[in-house]
Amino acid sequence: MVSFFDRKIEFLKGVGPQKAELLNKELGIFKFRDLLQYYPFRYEDRTKFYKIRELNDSLQYVQLIGQFSGFQTVGVGRKQRLVGTFHDDTGALELVWFQGVKWIKSRLTVGVPYLVFGKPTRYGSKMNIAHPEVEVLTEKNKAGSYLHPVYSVTEKLKKKFIDSKAISKMMKLLLVEAVHHIDETLPQHLIDQYRLQDKKTALIQIHFPKDSRTLQYAQYRLKLEELFYVQLRLLKMKISRMDAYPGIRFNNSDLLNKYYNDHLPFELTGAQKRVIKEIYTDFRSGKQMNRLIQGDVGSGKTMVAFLSMLIAIGNETQCAFMAPTEILADQHFNNLKEQARPLGIRVAKLTGSSKQSERKALDVALKAGEIHILVGTHALLEDRVKFQKLGLAIIDEQHRFGVAQRAKLWSKNRSTYPHILVMTATPIPRTLAMTLYGDLDISVIDELPVGRKPIKTYHMTDTKRIQMFGFIEKEIAKGRQVYIVYPLIEESATLDYNHLMDGYEGISRRYPDMPISIVHGRMKPEDKDWEMQRFINKETKIMVATTVIEVGVDIPNASVMVIENAERFGLSQLHQLRGRVGRGAEQSFCILMTGHKLTTEAKERIRTMVETNDGFRISEVDLKLRGPGDLMGTQQSGLMDLRISDLGKDGEILKQARSIAVEVLNEDPEITLSKNYPIKKQIESLSKNVINWSTIS
Ligand code: ADP
Ligand code: MG
């Protein structure tokens, strides 16, 4: 027999197969449990009653009590509207309906007390409310004091009359039955210790809150529970992996020391030293390392990666270094080769465009252990890529790779899994990192190499274009180079290309004698490379480009980044783009060009960019503005399957959830204590019902 919560939604009273199909398709509601966990996304406050005199159009929704003194039908045919004059003891206003005129009129009576709910707007000198909700005043609704749940529904659902109200009705029907089946999903000792609402109350209150205080408790309880189970799962994965997978012990640091003493081109920053120590500790622990390095663009992650590889190579193992794009793989390859030369280390490259003939030789050399470091793209994951003994795998720019790919790297050394080091230049807020990478240890490089001047960022509107040109002319006269970047969005690609080309022509006309490069995605790779090379060789002074230069290129002489239509970029993208300059010793600049009219959100993005260079701060704002889903792309979305928590806002609850999970696991690693039985049961239930978990386990 299926349990109550596993019953199909079509079997709920009043739903049936047709509505059920819509609920499946539009909202992902298949079973009773899905509906119950379809939480309101906001609540309308129906606890307060307004007087008509108090109304103004800055109010969102208001509730009024009063009577109609008359109705008027204005206009004819489809333009007909119904206007009711509604008054209380402080004044009168008009309630207007544009649809269902006849039907509504037939249901309203002059002189009867009504409760009205809607959004007041000013129309000429008078206030009115269009399409208000009107109910006959009763003892019950007069008492007010309830918060009205609002469920998000799609247009398609609305057309079939499944609106927020309809969902609420279904919920009521479901809850009446469900209350007899709801079990507690957290152990009593946690409920007591953290003074949590019980599950049954929380579910009832989240859908039909008594008052805002009780609602807050319900939200807190459900969020904490949700995040607790995410953290518990991640921590358990981490623990079990650490127990299950021994790591190769790297005890020899001779090669590292040799490089450190004889060849290191600069003093390491304190943060770099700290992270190397953390890695070396992992290497000697006898357990497999899974570590994430977070650090802003230019913080020197690559050097840390290189030093880690020296330890691995010094202990007779090989290294894999995986980058998200060919350009980036190329650059890492060239840099690593250079750094490795004095040590006699062999570095090879493998990408999708490696020639077959070369690949054969590479396969052989790799298998024989003659290659120490293999740099490349996704191609490294292919089955034919076989190492003699892979000791360390490094993944640059983790957010572009999925967790499954990380797992695939492990299998490159079946006898003992290689150590894994993941690097990301997109700093992620701690709260998000804890969830996304909860199974990894995290190191942070939060310090830039000394002598690096912070990039100065300015915001200019189009009217200041002349000044912007004046500025870049001066910089070019000093021998610097300049990027001018245009947005390129899939949906408006053609238009965007036109802007780019217009921009390029405009600049060419303005500076007829100036050598200018242009790079965009519609060019052939050879042409792109050629243009890129000219810019690198300083043959061209200005690089006009789309975001293809976002990752990869490292040109210290380029000191100005102009971003056109900056309002169209997301924060993390702006930050990444800005990171292309500021790599040399000179003062660098970033100029954000925008139109005059900006949305509140765009303003906040631009302001944040002007205010700070700190990638962590920027990522916090980004998370707040966009929410975690967008921030991470789709690959990790499995982990983002949160029904009530919002990682952008619930950071504090997340921290608490994590520390509770740590506590529980410390005391009861296998969740076998009888007092934790509800946890055990809930984990089992979750793993049956949350499909998305499969992507990470
Ligand atoms: P990331 O990969 O974090 O963006 P990189 O490792 O590419 O940064 O470093 C950026 C630049 O700074 C490189 O040219 C690198 O050689 C240099 N660099 C790294 N660490 C230091 C340091 N401690 N002192 C001075 N320069 C450094
Ligand atoms: Mg880098």
Image (tube, helix red, strand yellow):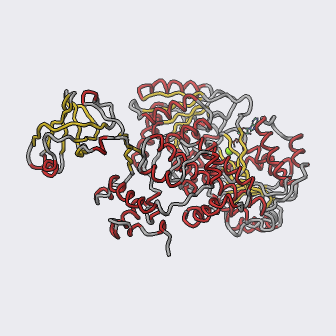
Seen at 58% across and 32% down, the residue is 560
Q: Is residue 320 left or right of residue 163?
A: right
- When the figure is inspected, residue 509 is found, relative to residue 685, above or below; the finding is above
Seen at 23% across and 38% down, the residue is 129
Image coordinates of residue 508 in percent, x first then y, are 47, 35
**Residue projecting furthest to the left:** 76
Q: Nearer the viewer, residue 494 or 645?
A: 645
Q: Nearer the viewer, residue 597 or 500?
A: 597
Q: Is residue 73 left or right of residue 296?
A: left
Q: Is residue 122 left or right of residue 207?
A: left
Can residue 194 be seen in this snapshot?
yes
Can residue 519 be seen in this snapshot?
no
- When the figure is inspected, residue 118 is found, relative to residue 344, above or below; the finding is above
- When the figure is inspected, residue 600 is found, relative to residue 659, above or below; the finding is above
Indicate which quadrant contains ligand 2.
top right
Image coordinates of residue 41 in percent, x first then y, are 43, 48
Image coordinates of residue 84 in percent, x first then y, are 15, 39
Residue 370: which quarter of the image? bottom right
Q: Nearer the viewer, residue 677 or 222?
A: 677
Residue 565: which quarter of the image? top left
Residue 45: which quarter of the image? top left
- When the figure is inspected, residue 210 is found, relative to residue 123, above or below; the finding is below
Q: Is residue 255 left or right of residue 458?
A: right
**Residue projecting furthest to the bottom:** 1
**Residue projecting furthest to the front:** 139
Seen at 89% across and 49% down, the residue is 253
Q: How many marks?
A: 0
Image coordinates of residue 223 in percent, x first then y, are 55, 49
Which corner quadrant holds the C terminus? bottom right
Q: Nearer the viewer, residue 600 or 669?
A: 669
